[in-house]
Every structure is written in C-alpha cells, then in structure tokens.
Amino acid sequence: RPKISNRWLTHSRLMRMHRITDSLRIASLADVQESAVDATVVVSVCQDTAEDNVGVLYYQFKLADGPHSRYLGGECTYDMFSEAVEAVASALADDETVCVHCHAGQSRSVAVSIAALARVNEWSYEKAREKVYQAHPNPMPEPTLLSFAQTYVVSDGNSMREYPSLDSSS
C-alpha cells in the first residue's frame, strides 16, 4: 500500500475547511484540531475545545446543536447564539480572517456564519444563507439555529450598535 505523506494529509484537511469568503472559513472540530488553521481568529461554537491546537486568538461559545441536544451541557439559547455571532462579526469587521467551527462543521458554525455575514455586509438573511450554501458542500443547520439566524438578521443584525473590539490592548 502506498504511503501518504503528511503534506498531502495537511492539504486535504485544509480543503475541508470551507472557504466561504476571503475572510471567513467554516470547519469541523477535527479539522481545527488536526491541521493548520488558515485564520487569525478561531471561534468555536461547540462544547469541545481546540484552543491548545491553534496558535491564534480563540473564542469559545458552548452552543448546543438545537434545544434537544444535551451533549456536554451546552446551551441552545438566542443569547448564546447572538454572542457567538457578535464575536465573528467583530473579527470580520476588524479585517481578521475567521474560522468558525463546531463538531461537524455543518450546523452551528453554518448558522452563526450566516448571521455574521449578513451583519457585516448588511445583507439579507437569504443572501447570506445563499453565499454560505454555495461555498459549503453539505450544510445541515438545525432548524432552531436557522430561526435564531433569521431573528438576529431582522432584529439585531442591522442595528446601529458599535462592534465590540477584539483588540486586547484597548
């Protein structure tokens, strides 16, 4: 059996980090744990952490994958969802390259990314959703999380609030 080089494995894992825009990636927990992260900020929206495996700014929000998910005690609340969106949107507004990850890279990370893209670009929910779905080969966001994204875009995402700074020196 032919031996597979580590370089090929790293490249194939980077390819699973879905490039949504020039500055936004969506990935799974395994992708972030096992490969180089093409981002300056990582936002985790799952209960497990990959913080020790990345050498960049890392934020974690223990967002459960829907109201019936009891895995590792995360919570599925609009407040938790909107905090995660704000972290992503703030980093994008600061011209950072952001990787959003959840366990599979298909549900929570997708819903949070839709809302953040809509906010930063002043897009509709539908336009942001279309952008993510075009770039991601298998998005499967949990319905409650999609409703959170829609609510965020309509209620909170177009407000005139200032983005909180992610710069630790301020």
Image (spheres, helix red, strand yellow):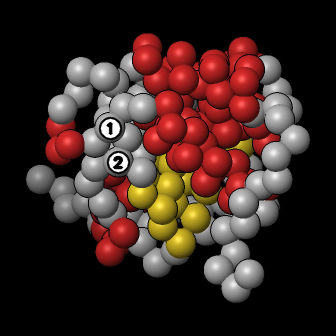
Amino acid type for the residue under numbered disc 1: Glu
Instruction: Say which quarter of the image contains residue 121.
Output: top right
Residue 25 versus residue 45: which sits nearer the camera? 45
State the residue at coordinates (64%, 48%).
86
Q: Is residue 144 above or below residue 119?
A: above
Using residue 157 as the reference point, say whether residue 141 is left or right of it: left
Residue 51 visible in this rendered orientation of the protein: yes
| Image quadrant containing the C terminus | bottom right
Amino acid type for the residue under numbered disc 2: Lys
Residue 121 disc label: none
Q: Which residue is mark 1?
A: 75
Using residue 152 as the reference point, say whether residue 6 is left or right of it: left
Using residue 143 as the reference point, say whether residue 130 is left or right of it: right
Marks 1,2: beta carbons within 8 A: yes
| Label 1 crowd (10 A; few <14 / some 14-19 / many >=20) | many
| Label 2 crowd (10 A; few <14 / some 14-19 / many >=20) | many
Residue 49 % position (x, y): 30, 60
Residue 140 % position (x, y): 42, 20
Q: Is residue 65 above or below residue 7?
A: above
State the residue at coordinates (43%, 17%).
144
Residue 169 versus residue 23: which sits nearer the camera? 169
Q: Which residue is mark 2?
A: 62
Residue 117 % position (x, y): 72, 37
State the residue at coordinates (79%, 42%).
120
State the residue at coordinates (67%, 68%).
166
Instruction: Say which quarter of the image contains residue 116.
Output: top right
Q: Is residue 131 above or below residue 51?
A: above
